[in-house]
Amino acid sequence: MKNLAEPPLVSVIMANYNGADHLAMALRSVLAQSVGHIEILLLDDASSDDSIKVARGVADTDPRVRIFETSRNAGPGAARNRGFEMATGRWIAIVDSDDIIHPCRLERMTTAGDALETDAVADDLTYFHDASIRPAGTLMGTNRPEKPAGLSATCFVSADPNAPQLGYLKPLIRRTALSGLRYREDIKIGEDHDLYMRFLLNGGRMHLLPQSYYLYRRHNSSLSYRMHPDDVAAIISAQDDLLRDYPDLSDGMLDHMALRRAALQRPLAFETLVQEIRGRHFGRAMGQLVHRPSLLPQLVKVGKSRLARALVRPRNASAVIARDPSEWTLQDWSVMLEKTM
């Protein structure tokens, strides 16, 4: 029998904010793991729904679940950092409160991590939609390796929009290998990517397995989610900070980061345009389109896709919908963006 005085094999950190609808399933998928000596640290980030009630209902049935509440919403990075401080396991795993993991995930990944003698081990992500557990593709797709492959910091820097975005990976990391590394709490988007980059640039070793044991939920709401320009600017700023903090990067790495930065300027310009139109600042929006006419086809494409999914259309939008989006005025876009973006 396992000596329960020993540190847990894995500390699972689960940050949560208003995730009551899926929280119980996420917690139970972790509790169902084939390795029993684990701890689950549920960090609730000032939820206003029934998350705490749901979490307590699960915790009452299993003492491995520990719940920590905050009175002020501070974001997932801050919540996970609290988990890092309290974790006692040999490995640390991040599991989102709306996702599901395979019953053998922690056993197989820790075994693989030990065999590879690596500091972190990741698996592919399998996407599924809110209304169905049926898989809807994977993060790596055809880029999935045939055998465990080492990941370098360069792998995480790509300007190709069709390349897998490795910042979405959910690796298990040896707690001792973190060496005090923490999430940035001042950025809302891309905090995982920044952490992995710093981990690797600090000398950490990470391997990617060809298998997928992690089910990543895609919500209907997330499909229509738009980043604020401040979020994109923060991603760019985080990369600029990496250049400052790691001045000895190779020329190849610097080239990759320059291309990625240039690629991020386009979504920054587009999200700024969307905000200007939604705010009915048509003069500034027109100025952007004059300066960057390449944004217009993207605006038309997004408009068509949003209209196809829109369940609630604005009261005076019927005349707008009747025309092709390429013929819309900026005032028309303002009406549609108000409800569909």
Image (tube, rainbow, N blue to C red):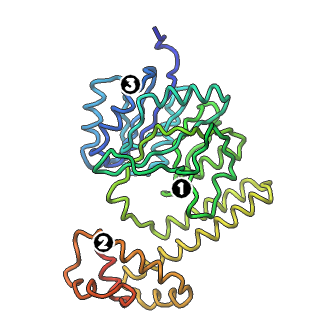
Helix, strand or loop status at disc 1 = loop
Q: Position of residue 282 (x, y in %)?
A: 41, 89
Type of the residue with mark 3: Arg
Can residue 180 be seen here?
Answer: no
Dot label at residue 190: 1
Helix, strand or loop status at disc 2 = helix
Farthest-out residue, left: 315
Give the distance between the C-alpha atoms of the residues marked 1 and 2, in whole angstroms.
Answer: 29 Å
Q: Which residue is mark 3?
A: 64
Type of the residue with mark 1: Gly
Dot label at residue 288: none
Front disc: 1 or 2: 2
Examine the image and state in which quarter residue 263 appears. Answer: bottom right
Give the distance between the C-alpha atoms of the residues marked 2 and 3, in whole angstroms.
Answer: 45 Å
Q: Position of residue 88 (x, y in %)?
A: 52, 26
Mark 1 vs 2: CB contact within 8 A: no
Examine the image and state in which quarter residue 225 appears. Answer: bottom left
| Relative depth, front residue between 168 and 288 | 168
Q: Using a 10 Å C-alpha cutoff, classify the residue at mark 2 as few (fewer than 14 neighbours), some (14 to 19) or many (20 or more).
A: few
Give whichever of discs 1 and 2 has the lower sequence position: 1
> Residue at (61%, 59%) from the top-left corner?
238
> Residue at (49%, 13%) from the top-left corner?
5
Q: Position of residue 113 (x, y in %)?
A: 61, 30
